[in-house]
Amino acid sequence: MPLKLLVTAKRVEDPESRIQVKPDGTGIVTEGVNYKLNPFDEIAVEEALRLEEQHGGEVVVVSIGGARAVTELRAALAMGADRGIHVRHDGPLDPVVVSALLAKVFEQEKPDLAILGKQSIDDDQNQAGQYLAERLGLGQATFASKHDSLESEAEQKRLPGLAVSADGTRVTVVREVDGGVETLEVRLPAVVTTDLRLNKPRFASLPGIMKAKKKEIREIPAASLGVDLTPKVAVRKLAAPPARKGGVKVADVDELVRKLRDEAKAV
Amino acid sequence: MKEYTAPLRDMQFVLRELAPIDEVARLPGCGEVNLELAEAILAEAGKFAAGVLSPLNVVGDREGARVVADGEVVTATGWRGAYRSFVEGGWNALSCSPEYGGQGVPRLVSALVEEMWNAANLSFALCPMLTRGAIEALELKGSEELKGRYLPKLTSGEWAGTMVLTEPQAGSDLSAVRTRAVRQPDGSYRLEGQKIFITYGEHDLAENIVHLVLARTPDAPEGVKGISLFVVPKFLVNADGSLGARNDVRCVSLEHKLGIHASPTAVLAFGDKDGAVGWLVGEENRGLEYMFITMNAARFSVGLEGVGIAERAYQLALACARERLQGTELGTRSKEKVAILRHPDVRRMLLLMKSRTEAMRAVACVTAAAMDTARCHPEAEQRARSQAFVELMIPIVKAWSTDNAIDIASLGIQVHGGMGFIEETGAAQLFRDSRITSIYEGTNGIQAIDLVGRKVARDGGETIRRVMAEMREVVTRLEQEKSETLSAIAARLRDGVTALEQAVQFVVATFGPDVRRAAAGAVPFLELFGTVAGGWQMARAALAAHRHLEAGTGEAGFLRAKISTARFYADHVLVRGGGLARTVVADADAVLALPDDQF
């Protein structure tokens, strides 16, 4: 059965850039910062492409953000996704708003499966996927992973880690949990969020990049989706972690205990 | 070694401001690739360079390539997989003709992509670079049959190419080539002889290797006018395109080299048994002429190797300078250790690296854009003008960029201090790898002779003076901006152009009547022209950055850094022009006067 897959592609700061907090703590200095497709979303796109290769169907990528978010949509299209949706929104966002907007897109597109990165590496919230499933009343399987290693033959062959049943009604997901992995079966349509060890995303090929230019990206103004765009979370202050102080060597256990008790007040 | 990061910001700046991609995209046949697509290509190529090629650079250096039984060559761990990814990604076909499956991306864009491959892993990048050389030779003069048989798979990269020129007695002087080619009744030839220094002459990356070989037919005239060009595949190709018998060409050994260890440099024996089967490209006795046409493209590519190595050396040195804490802030009483980036001389070294690398990139890209214009412009006059500019600039891109790269890689070691001399940092590898670039594809001395003779003296200095007129226009525009920094840059550029004019006058006047004097100053002349051309591009960059700042467009930090870097170039590099001009004009006698037995 062909599958229709909806995948997220968020534009995030490239951690290789030098990230500096603005002196007034209201955010980061954006000048000189490079941006990229959220690595967790990149894994989601890869997984969707593998499912499409196995089952046929369509991969639709969606990004919410300002004009530049098109760059990340094109990156996903260059990997092989079929078309893009750009929910245009220029202001601040939080996972509550993001999930509300994604729910609207989901209702329009009616995919069999939504695959999201489990979190975006800018503010590491890890909430949008869970909210989305709840809003839609769908089953969810978060932190999708797989038993095979990223060096395995299955990975070399680019086999999907998510197993969709032949009749297209269920998906089996191996997910990472504390202390191990568990396997869930979820009825479709459903929401899956991807963890790091699900797959190794492909590099876009040159023909893929050339073709991506001609693929459709539909722009939808966020305001047109009938969603309250006011974030429920406001960033009050951003600060860099305090610089680590140098450690000290202690002579023996007694000194260690004394220091922990008297100086660090830890015991 | 710290992994490579593609300098996308500077590349984008060049494509917007100095060698506008949108102008190239308007040329017929260069269409499609506008700024947006070019940026997407650069971004993805940058990922591939950083993620696949860069991590293999050190592996390749340590393991090298080795010969196993029967003359087969094994490349370093991971290289076969990387090459497969490279081919699957379609990167080999980047600048190739769409007729045989290429993407036909403008040279301007492919030049920047090539810079990335070179920076990430020079040894790897040589394989596709040589393949492209073979493709160009076949496209230029190959029969339809040869093109149909070889070009599709060379374009995709399933097969690799080589350029087989050098013999022990025929290095820079190819007229001494002795490899023999005897015509057979079926129209093919049998080749016999030994070739050396064949880059990627044998390897396990591709399933077939297509050698383009210079050889002599039995009745050929002596010297340069008796050399022909042949295609000699490692495996013969059947009529249906499948691979047939192994041809009689073997790798005898690989050289042990100072650098580019992972690039197999082969000694090839042709015709040890019954003759290597080859096919003539074009006409007999015109091989060297064809080779020189494709060699121009190869020389440009070697220049990009210089840009790539310089960029990588800068990135490595900068990372070290930010991390390494030594000494305290000069001029303060603070006892706090500071990163060596704070020390004025380290900053000076880093700026010598950064400013020249940016200047080299800009000069190469302006030349690449002219290549696209020379190929695609609808008006013949514009095509000819651009072609003349390209030919003038190729020795600059090749020799000036590689001479600079060696110096920049050396400065990179210096910034690292003692650790730079230790292989672990990678700074040493870049220095070793860079060293060949001023030698192969025509030594830089030969580039300089080509520049003063064929490119400057032959047309009486007309082409170079047209470029100098453009430089003077930039001086005027800088002065009109009423900025102290831009005026300072303008003053240095004006002095540079004046110095260049003196040297051009000397070269034009001397090359005919007293060629030895002109030749004695050829390398300083090349350095002078490169230095001033770099200053010209940095001045244009400063002007564009200034205008964006005035208009409040673009990233202010990057733009201010561009102006500051251009100012540094003017004061520390461009300023040397006057001295170089004096060397060109006055000091030839000292070179020639010393009796041979006093050396």
Image (spheres, rainbow, N blue to C red):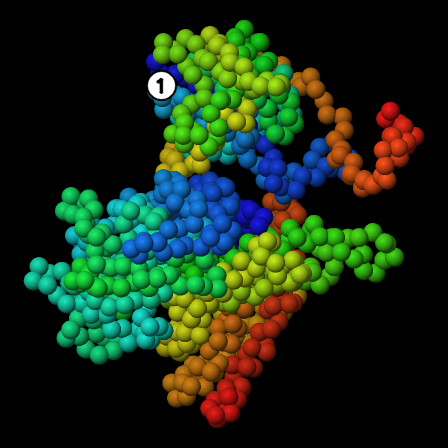
Which one is in front, A68 or B158?
B158
Instruction: Name the foreground residue: B436 vs B546.
Output: B436
User: Which residue appears at 57% of the width and 54% of the height?
Assistant: B426
The residue depicted at 51 percent of the width and 11 percent of the height is A184
Q: Can residue B321 be seen in this view?
A: yes
The relative height of residue B414 versus residue B93 in the rendered view (above or below) is: below
> What percent of the width, then of the height, locates residue A130?
58, 14
Secondary structure beneath disc 1?
helix
Neighbour class for label 1 at 10 Å: few (<14), some, many (≥20)? some
Q: Where is residue B470 in the image (x, y as percent from the top left)?
A: 49, 65
Whether residue B30 appears in this view of the structure is no
Q: Which of B490 and B121 is in front in this view?
A: B121
Q: Give the letter of the chain under mark 1.
A: A
Q: Name the residue under label 1.
A: A55
> Which residue sits at x=46%, y=91%?
B596
Residue type for callout 1: His
- Within the image, what quadrant is residue B345 found in? bottom right
Q: In which quarter of the image is residue B31?
A: top left
Residue found at the far right of this picture: A262
Where on the picture, by quarter, is residue B274?
A: bottom left
| Residue B509 located left or right of residue B345 | left
* Residue B45 spot, x, y in % from top left: 46, 43
